[in-house]
Image: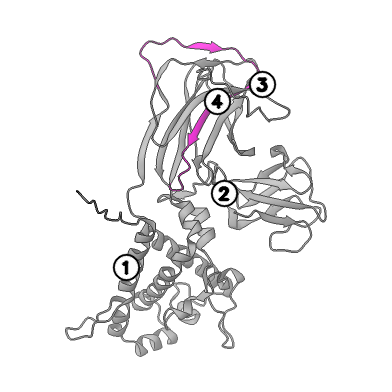
Amino acid sequence: MQPIEIVVGRGGPYDPVAGTSQCPVPVIAGQGVYIEKAGYGTYDYDKWGLLSLGGFQLLGGILFQAGERFYIHLTGVSYGTGQTSYTNGFNYSQVISALYGRIGWRQPTISGSPVLTSINTMAKGNRVYQDFHALATISNLKSVMEEVAASDSSLNTYLESLQRGIIMRCLNGVFDNPEYIDQRLLFKRSLVVNDQLIENKGQFVGIRINVLPAPDLAVQVDSISLYFDSAITFNLYVFNDSIKAPLAVISVTTVANSQTVIGLSDIVLNYISSNNQGGAFYIGYFQSDIGSAKAYWEQGCSSSGACYGWDYFESNKLAGYDWERNQVRYSGYTFGMNLHVSVFRDHTWQIVRKAALFDNVIGLQMAAQIVEQILYNTRSNSTERILKDNISAAGAQLDLNGVAAISDSPHTTGLKKQIDKELQRMKLSFFPKAKAITVNIC
């Protein structure tokens, strides 16, 4: 996936102005990123932070300078306590970014028509909703909106929300199989308690998780149990072995001499978050951050995970917050950490890479939604009445369902039948049936 290029003062849709510190990029809200600066390399994590609405900001009084060039790399790992990007087996933020705007609305040319924003006229797939059904027009939609005399701004907001809802209906129609595979603690404490304190050596320590390079599987870290002899606050880091910058930085607080369970949000380790390579992830902390506090080495029984492997590791700390990735040692110490991990089907990568397959079903679903709104809306105005006069309820039912509510009506392929056919076709694309094998017995 190509990074997003940002040039200070260039005047592009996301380019910041010189002398400011924020670079809003709403289309990547909820996604994990790392920042690269031209001529500098991977930008130090302590020089920037994520914006909650998408994008990043410079920290420590640093301001953008004219002509500076930055690259935003999407990692696929989202985190934070205020939002959750995963739903129904895919990362919502990433699939919406891929599918939204593949089909757009054609700007009406009639005098006095609403002016649509570029977000709503964007058509990456070179198709427009008006071409899927004669009733799919901007004027018809505005006439049956709940908001009377909606402004252009309100209409554009409504169109964005409507398209997102349509996309979700189509996704849910394809990916409706069970997602859950497995969940467990990495180890269970043994009945004989023989916990020991671990001496600090100033290293980077924690848990290494190997994820299979499978594009439809994800390992989610649901929570972490911390066990230290002191009440302290420090940072946990999530790294991938192919990406230098941390994928996530999480502040945690412990309770002295007692296990503390901390719920995590959107720490999802998968094919995408490792630069499409699978590979190893490291979740841990720098011992220099915990001062005189010590972690407990718990005695327990390890459990094998589905679709991943894991070990406790330690590695020498380098300058700043870097560490030796080529000199990782596996000692078996638990370093006061235990994870609760779930495995589920993750269709994000396939959806993003095959976004064009959804064009037809999204267009048909939008047409069906508009017909339903015309049939069942509670508005009463001249346009709405003309609509219902020109297309009787029976005719609209025929368009929608393929049959009118009368005994001798003709049968046609209604929108819902067309949608069902498209959904079945797409299911076969994403979940092909096993081919029969012929075996010859001599």
Looking at the image, is 272 positioned above or below residue 127? Answer: above
Q: Amino acid at mark 2?
A: Gln
In the rendered image, residue 148 lying in the magenta stretch gets the answer no
Mark 4 → mark 2, Cα distance in angstroms:
24 Å
Q: Is residue 141 left or right of residue 371?
A: right
Residue 290, horizontal then vertical, whole percent? 63, 21
Q: Amino acid at mark 1?
A: Asp
Q: Is residue 143 visible?
A: no
Q: Is residue 70 above or below residue 426?
A: above
Looking at the image, tell me whether mark 1 or mark 4 is earlier in sequence order: 4
Circle 4: is it few (<14), some (14-19), or many (20+) Cα within 10 Å? Answer: many
Q: Is residue 203 magenta?
A: yes
Please report the bounds of the magenta region as a residue range: 188-216
**Mark found first going from the N terminus, 2 or 3:** 2
Residue drawn at 47 percent across, 28 percent down: 310
The residue under label 1 is 420
Q: Earlier in the sequence, mark 4 or mark 2?
A: 2
Circle number at residue 288: 3
